[in-house]
Structure formats: C-alpha cells, structure tokens
Amino acid sequence: MTMETSSNLASSDATPEPALSDLTDDLSRAAKQNDGKVAKIVDEAGANGLLPMMTVMGLLLVSPLSGIPLFSTSVGVMIFLCAVQAAMGRDRLWLPGFLRRQRIDPSRIEKAMDRIHSAAEWLEARATSRLEWLSLPPARAAFLTIAAVYGAVMPIMELIPFTSSLLGAAVVMIGLGLLLRDGVLLLISILPTLIAAGVIFRLLLA
C-alpha cells in the first residue's frame, strides 16, 4: 500500500486518499506474521505515516482490546508519541524499549481489526474536505497538541469506565480530520475537552 507521509499530507494541494481501513488490514497481517510483537508491528505498519498510525491507535481504544489491563495506558503513550513526533515533522514512530518489547495476542489484534475495519470505512466514506484551514498550520499543531494531551491522560482514564474509549474516539476524529482535511471532524474532537472544562468549572463554582 502506498501512503503519503504525514508531513506531505499537511502541505500537498491534492486531497489525501483514505487509507485508514487499509492500515487496519496491515496491522492485522503484521501481528499475525510477527507473533504479536509490538516492535515488528509498528515498524511494518508505521511505514504508512504517523497520522494513520495515531488514528488506528484511537480506534484500538474503542475496540474490545481496551478491556485488557494497562492496554489503554500503553496505547495512550503511543498516541502521545505519535502526536508529538508528527508535530516535529517526523514520518516514522519511535517507541521506547519497554513498549517495543511488548507482545499482544495476534488473534486478539485480528479480531479487533476485523471489528474496527468497517468503522474505519464508515468514517472514511463520510469524511470530506471541509474547513480545510483547520487541518493546516498553525491549527494543525494545536490539534496534534490536543491529541498528545488525550494520550497523556489515558492512564488516569483507565480508572473511569468508558472514558478511554471516549478519548480514543476523539483521537480518531483528530487523525482523520488531519488526514482528510475535514475541519468538522476536528471540531468534534474537542468535545471531551469542552466537557471536562465544563465539569471543572461547575466544581469550582460549587
């Protein structure tokens, strides 16, 4: 599969082609071929770019895999690293050794990818170029920062049921919004931030 790098997607005048659903297939195949070793999966599937990888990480949090203890925390770290490195202009994901040494049951990955493949296709079919300026600098950096924050707070969210899936969905909106230049998806992605701000504001006033 051929995929423009994340930096090219941000600067090219052509509308990027959807590739998220293809990446779910790549992840499933890489997991099966490499016995679920995270290092090999990331090295093979990560060749498609950081934004597609970050988006799939968000989809994983909405999948049944999020029920595995500490899975959301590990994926949150990867989302954080994807977002930060994409903002720095990198094209390939660097992971610390403790994450690269992890292994996930390949059958679980295959089942999760099968489930989210159709969701990825559904999202791609409805995303379109709208409010494109939100997907370009300097707004692009702001949304990558939001994605990094979502990833960073994931360990805390594991303690609150369903919140990791909510933030995972928001990361998907950011990734697809930047990939497909859909500003509407990007605006939807900040809903968790607005909800959290509202809750904090109410607590301060109480």
Image (tube, rainbow, N blue to C red):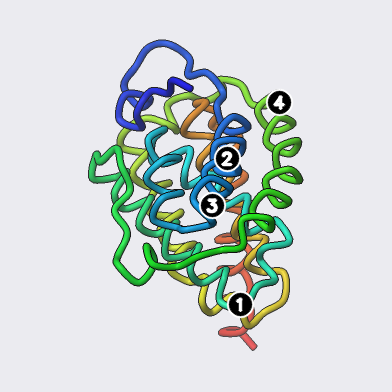
Provide the secondary structure element on which disc 4 rests. Answer: helix
| Side of 129 where 132 appears, left or right | left
Residue topped by disc 1 = 158
The label nearer to you, 1 versus 3, is 3
Towards the viewer: 16 or 200: 16
Residue 186: image quadrant is top right
Other residues around mark 1 within 10 Å, as few (<14) / some (14–19) / many (≥20): some
Give SS at disc 2.
Answer: helix
Of the residues under marks 4 and 1, which one precedes in the sequence?
4
Give the label, 4 or 1, closer to the camera: 1
Query: Cα distance, mark 2 to mark 3?
Result: 16 Å
Q: Amino acid at mark 2?
A: Arg
Which residue shows up at 33% across the image and 48% down it?
A: 93
Secondary structure beneath disc 1? loop
Q: Which residue is mark 3?
A: 57
Q: Position of residue 63 (x, y in %)?
A: 70, 56
Looking at the picture, tell me which residue is in the foreground, 134 or 34. Answer: 34
